[in-house]
Image (cartoon, rainbow, N blue to C red):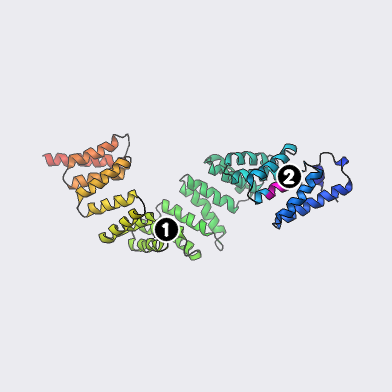
Amino acid sequence: MLDKKLLDNFEDISQISDNELLDVTEKSKRGYQLIKEERLLEAEALFNDILEKDDDNNYALVGLGDIERKKLNFGNAIIYYQRCLAKHSNNNYALFGLGDCYRSLDDYKRATDIWEEYLKYDPENITVLTRIASSYRKLKNFQKSRQSYLRVLEIVPDNDYALVGIGHLYYDFKEYKEALKYWLKMYEINQVKIDVRVLTSIGNCYRKLKEFSKGIYFFKKALEISPNNFYAIFGLADCYRGNKEYHEALKYWLSIIEQDSKNNLVLTRIGDTYRYLKDYENSQLYYKKALDVDFDMFAILGLALLQKEQGKYEEALVAIKNLIKTNPKNSILYINAAECYEALGQIENAIDILSSFLQLGMKNVTIIDYINNLNNLRKKLDV
């Protein structure tokens, strides 16, 4: 019995002999089998042979497109898929392959347009729906991405790709509680063979929500599976920092530096941790190590805060005011500068520098409250 789909796609079947039809059918089947076996040159020869007899044959054109796509020659693959679609506009395989090529070229807009066309013929294809959702996420189109993920979950409620993807979508848009809802469901379904990335994602949500103890639990779970996982170690250290368990935080920060001695973010965090522990010598050492790697605003600020904590207010002020010049919208800098002025008894200067932040058109309750407190202090001093 001949493949009905194959026969349906010939332009004029009456003009082709039975032997030729059987030859095309067998060659097509053989070609796709060879693609699965990664024997691409042999498959290519078979499909080219079919095109010599029928230059619009959709199976051969899609097959050649698939071969070029496997070889990462996306431009060539696109040509074959488009040739197929010019004659067979509703060919799902060509639409799928074409969309996948554009996705691989980071052209998510074209990819989604083509996959949306695909859904007209196969509206419940889970693979295509999840790829559309993922591409809309890349395009930062929250509503369309969410809609596509939810459609997948409507069809297959426990679909791993959709649960993970919609979690990332909510995380990207800083909706951490919603992200958690889907990632925790993924965790419940797959506790025995959970992907470490799901565990670190859950941990990061709790870290962002400042629920540090819960974050610690999931980062430790991740380390049970992948003991050297950078994201789990970093997250664990940061959660301990959030819980003010500085000795524990330091242990994990230092373990990262053992493997990545030039990580200036972590070097700065180590400097911060030693500062919290009042170990000013080591704190200064690590801030300077961070600055030896690259310019780091937080390392410079850390050194300034170190000076401030040691009562070296004028030296701290020089560094903080220089940072304000390059980071004029960072409220933390103004607050620390004002605290230095206040410690020096220069209340007017403290009020002036805080007011200069508000003059930028910025609104900050902490700064407004601080100005009010300083004004009250000034009145008491004037009495």
Q: Residues within 10 Å of mark 2 (few under 14, many from 20)?
A: many
Q: Which residues are magenta?
A: 60-67
- Distance between mark 1 and mark 2 Cα atoms: 49 Å
55 is within the stretch colored magenta: no
The C terminus - image quarter: top left
At x 75% / y 46%, what residue is drawn?
Answer: 60
On residue 282, which mark appears? none
At x 85% / y 41%, what residue is drawn?
Answer: 13
- Helix, strand or loop status at disc 2: helix
Q: Is residue 347 visible?
A: yes
Name the foreground residue: 271 vs 196: 271
Name the foreground residue: 127 vs 210: 127
On residue 61, which mark appears? 2
Q: Residues within 10 Å of mark 1 (few under 14, many from 20)?
A: some
Q: Is residue 168 left or right of residue 259?
A: right
- Vertical side of 296 occupied by 233: above or below: below
Q: Is residue 245 left or right of residue 109?
A: left
Q: Quadrant of residue 39?
A: bottom right
On residue 234, which mark appears? 1
x, y percent for residue 231:
45, 57
Kindly identify the amino acid type of the residue bearing the numbered disc 1.
Phe
Name the foreground residue: 59 vs 90: 59
Kindly identify the amino acid type of the residue bearing the numbered disc 2.
Leu
- Helix, strand or loop status at disc 1: helix
x, y percent for residue 63:
72, 48
- Vertical side of 222 occupied by 327: above or below: above
Q: Quadrant of residue 335?
A: top left
**Secondary structure mostly seen in the magenta stretch:** helix
Residues at discs 1 and 2 in contact (Cβ within 8 Å): no
x, y percent for residue 45:
75, 51
Q: Is residue 278 visible?
A: no
Counting residues from the start of the chain, the first of labels 1 and 2 encountered is 2
